[in-house]
Image (spheres, rainbow, N blue to C red):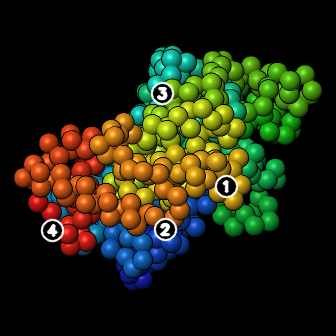
Amino acid sequence: MNIAKILIVEDDQELQEALVDTLTLNGFEVISVSSAEDALVALEDDIGMVFTDIRMDGMDGYALMKRIRAIKPYLPIVLMTAYGTIEQAVDAMKSGAVDYIVKPFEASVLVEKAKAYFNRDASTDDDFVVADPATQQLKTMAKKVAESEASVLISGESGTGKEVLARYIHKQSQRSKQPFVAINCAAIPENMLEAMLFGYEKGAFTGAAKSMPGKFEQAQGGTIFLDEIGEMKSDLQAKILRVLQEKEVERIGSHRVVYLDVRVLSASNINMKEAIQDGRFREDLFYRLNVFPMHLPPLRERPRDIAAISEKILQRHCGRSRIEPMVSAPAMKQLIEYTWPGNIRELDNVIQRALVMMSGDTIQLQDIILDTDTAFSNSAHAPEEQQAIVEDSESSPAFEVASVDSADDTKDLRAREVALILETLKQFNGHRQKTAETLNISPRTLRYKIAKLKEQGVDVP
């Protein structure tokens, strides 16, 4: 049925085999693994949907879902559990699952969910995060062009979010209920790309053990996104041009014509006009793809997006397993002033590092490790410049702690922080709002710190 596969994550071997058999009999390609750790490796394959158990040894289904949402937010995830409750179902949906199945369930239920969500886009409209005037205007334009059937060519540096913009256009279009199929033309070997795009019949070439549809067929009724189209070789460009002109495709090894109803979106990080002049890209194909051109600026040219995108990245990586931290004013200033040669991909990496390095519930300046740093030796991390601020980004002197001269002082710093919180709570007879206002931290931050203290067995007023 499809080249993309359904990933089954289930540690009960007997049930895993039953799930695989059921989906295979209904025409789906299936990969099955017994742990969340193996599932993360399997994501390197072409996966169109995930069914995962919740209760597993090691990483559980919720944690796996959080990881998948962070790296592939568009991938539909259905959770399976024998311990399901309404509360769990609601929580799972809020955390990013598209659906929830309570064991035991009928085979028909599994197939129904697969047909409903396979190769669908599970990301939200808000995944295309904008705050800068330049990208706000671009988003408004994208919403308008989504209402048409025009082919769109998105230009921009690598890592700027071109696929996210393409998915947004698809989600806003009348094809939103149909598949969004993306393929990176630069990531697939030349001798495989044609088969991936057009499909093939059994025996068409060595290794073609069965007939498989291509990406164009998978996108039937929906949208195909040809990423890095500028890297495609000239002979394949000619074949793509014919598909777009005739709106039909033939699988390799077949003479049967498959008529297509597919919208084409494409993207490139190279200068397409220069590629045409150099003879590397066909001019006629360019004009087929470039009916409506859109340019996504690099992150350094839309600094107001940085805070909003950082917030979205934090939400994805924290999920339900930890409280989302705040970003202090000095740390955010560092993010905004940096030039981001790697764009959003680099920002995502820096945010992940900060989550590893941070203490407490606030990302501080010393937690920001940029790619220009070497061996964690950025000046922001120099001991004489480290300053521990146990507060929101706009802390007052009442809750500011002296600079830290060495790592050994951290324990003393934490002890002084705890003492200050407890003394202030006692002063106001345990009143949380007054305590938070006096310490100049948010009520959420105070609640988090109190919860941590109680976990440690501290008697909190």
- Give how far across and how far down residue 217 sits, in percent: 59, 44
Upstream in sequence: badge 4 or badge 3: 3
User: Disc 2 vs disc 4: which is toward the camera?
Assistant: 2
Say which residue label 2 marks.
408
Residue at the spot of label 3: 130
Which residue is disc 1 drawn over?
A: 377
Say what secondary structure mark 2 lies in. helix
Q: Would you place residue 359 above or below residue 237 in this image? A: below
Toward which corner of the image does residue 4 lie, by quadrant? bottom right
- Tell which of 425 and 311 is nearer to you: 425
- Which of the marked residues, 3 or 1, is nearer the chain's N terminus? 3
Quarter in which the N terminus is drawn: bottom right
| Mark 1 surroundings within 10 Å by alpha-carbon count, few (fewer than 14), some (14 through 19), many (20 or more) | few
Residue at numbered disc 4: 459
Q: Residues within 10 Å of mark 4 (few under 14, many from 20)?
A: few
Q: Quadrant of residue 46?
A: bottom right
Mark 4, secondary structure of its residue: loop
Q: Which mark is residue 402?
A: none
The correct choice, above or below, for 219 with respect to 24 in the image is: above
Q: Nearer the viewer, mark 2 or mark 3?
A: 2
Q: Quadrant of residue 437?
A: top left
* In contact (CB < 8 Å): disc 1 and disc 2: no
- Residue 185 at least partly seen: yes
Give the percent coordinates (x, y) of residue 257.
67, 40
Q: Amino acid at mark 1?
A: Ser
Of pointers 1 and 4, the one earlier in the residue sequence? 1
- Give the mark nearest the N terminus, 2 or 3: 3
Q: Would residue 57 be found to the left or right of residue 375 on screen?
A: left
Q: Residues within 10 Å of mark 3 (few under 14, many from 20)?
A: many
